[in-house]
Amino acid sequence: MNAPAFQAKDFKSDLKPIWCPGCGDFGVLQGLYRALAAIGRPPHEIAFISGIGCSSRIPGYTTAYGFNSVHGRSLPIAQGVKLANPDLLVVVAGGDGDGFSIGGGHVAHAIRRNTDLTYLVMDNQVYGLTKGQLSPTAPRGLQTVTSPLGSLEEPINPLLYVLAYGAGFVAQATPADMPGMTALIEEAIRYPGFSFVNIQSPCVTFGEDDQQLKAHKAKMKTLASLGHDSANQLKAMDLARAYGTELYTGVFYRNPNPPPTYDALIRLRQAEQSKKAVPRNRILDAYLQK
Ligand SMILES: Cc1ncc(C[n+]2csc(CCOP(=O)(O)OP(=O)(O)O)c2C)c(N)n1
Ligand code: SF4
Ligand SMILES: [Mg+2]
């Protein structure tokens, strides 16, 4: 058997992560390296785009191209990168705050365009980088520095959110199950279209006890063990409603007939239009005829 083209270490940059010891993002990063090794594309064919947050530091820790961009703006930038160079494998990484507070409006549009990219959200139910404020996925009643008497708001359900807008691939993972999470990241990257993985990545510094790896291990249930058929979109939505109470991991929904991606359609249109284009040497003639 041939040796694999790449190993996890080929995707690890020289930059040392500055996350708090024990942060869930360490596990996510390891899973990501392994998933990329399994995919087998070289680092220079991959672009990582992120916003701002602890989890948004991920691009710097890989040997792929990276852009640690602006808070909440990773998806528009990633779509631009993919359209400018459709041959790149584009992965977007960021936090729950980045994706579903300030960046929430962009999620729907990335999904409806179905640009071929993978969106990994490190959901820790808190703003980690800015020291523990209430995030959009934080449970009702949570006491934080910005909700000292307990949050009065219902959390956003990221799984239902993306399913409702028609995302073709929707999964949930936790670094408490490294092999499972790695396989899900790989599957999401291989899906031809917009794919989303909500990764329950604990914040050990500002997160609650029931959001830590030990609690995840005890609580997680795989969707496979429930006999879930990932082609069943309505059932996926039904199961996704349990976000915040149950910790289901695995693929909620995978479109069995993926539609054409936006980047493929743009390529097609460019090819059609260029057939009708006036040859360069006749442009002046065409202008003078008008
Ligand atoms: C436009 C703008 N608004 C606010 C901030 C401050 N800010 C930086 S990161 C962040 C939230 C980070 O939380 P999350 O996206 O959940 O990532 P985590 O740190 O938890 O991984 C905020 C509010 C900013 N950098 N830019
Ligand atoms: S503050 Fe939380 S999310 Fe940020 S590095 Fe520390 S443990 Fe991780
Ligand atoms: Mg967060």
Image: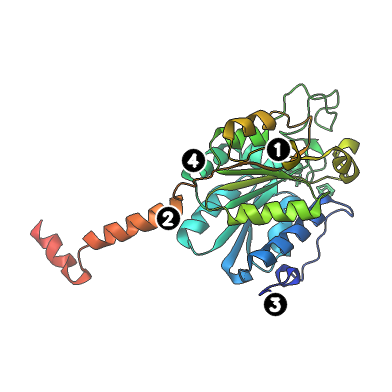
What numbered label is drawn on residue 55?
none
Foreground: disc 2 or disc 1: 1
Residue beneath disc 4: 112
Query: In the image, is 79 to the left or to the right of 199?
Result: left
| Residue 206 visible in rendering | no
Rendering coords of residue 244 (x, y %): 77, 31
| Mark 4 Cα shell of 10 Å, populated few (<14), some (14-19), many (≥20) | some
Query: In the image, is 227 to the left or to the right of 276?
Result: right
Amino acid of disc 3: Ala
Of the image marks 2 and 1, the number of the one nearer the N terminus? 1
Residue beneath disc 1: 227
Foreground: disc 4 or disc 1: 1
Of the image marks 3 and 1, the number of the one nearer the N terminus? 3
Residue beneath disc 2: 264
Amino acid of disc 2: Ala
| 31 and 47: which is toward the camera | 31
Q: Is residue 271 above or below residue 98?
A: below
Work out how far the residue at label 4 is from the one at label 2, CA to CA, in angstroms. 14 Å
Q: Determine the secondary structure under disc 1.
A: loop
Foreground: disc 3 or disc 2: 3
| 83 and 231: which is toward the camera | 231
When asked about the image quadrant of residue 248, the answer is: top right
Rendering coords of residue 269 (x, y %): 33, 54
Q: Determine the secondary structure under disc 3.
A: loop
Work out how far the residue at label 3 is from the one at label 4, CA to CA, in angstroms. 39 Å
Amino acid of disc 1: Gly
Of the image marks 3 and 4, the number of the one nearer the N terminus? 3
Query: In the image, is 248 to the left or to the right of 103?
Result: right
Residue beneath disc 3: 3
Of the image marks 3 and 2, the number of the one nearer the N terminus? 3
Work out how far the residue at label 2 is from the one at label 1, CA to CA, in angstroms. 34 Å
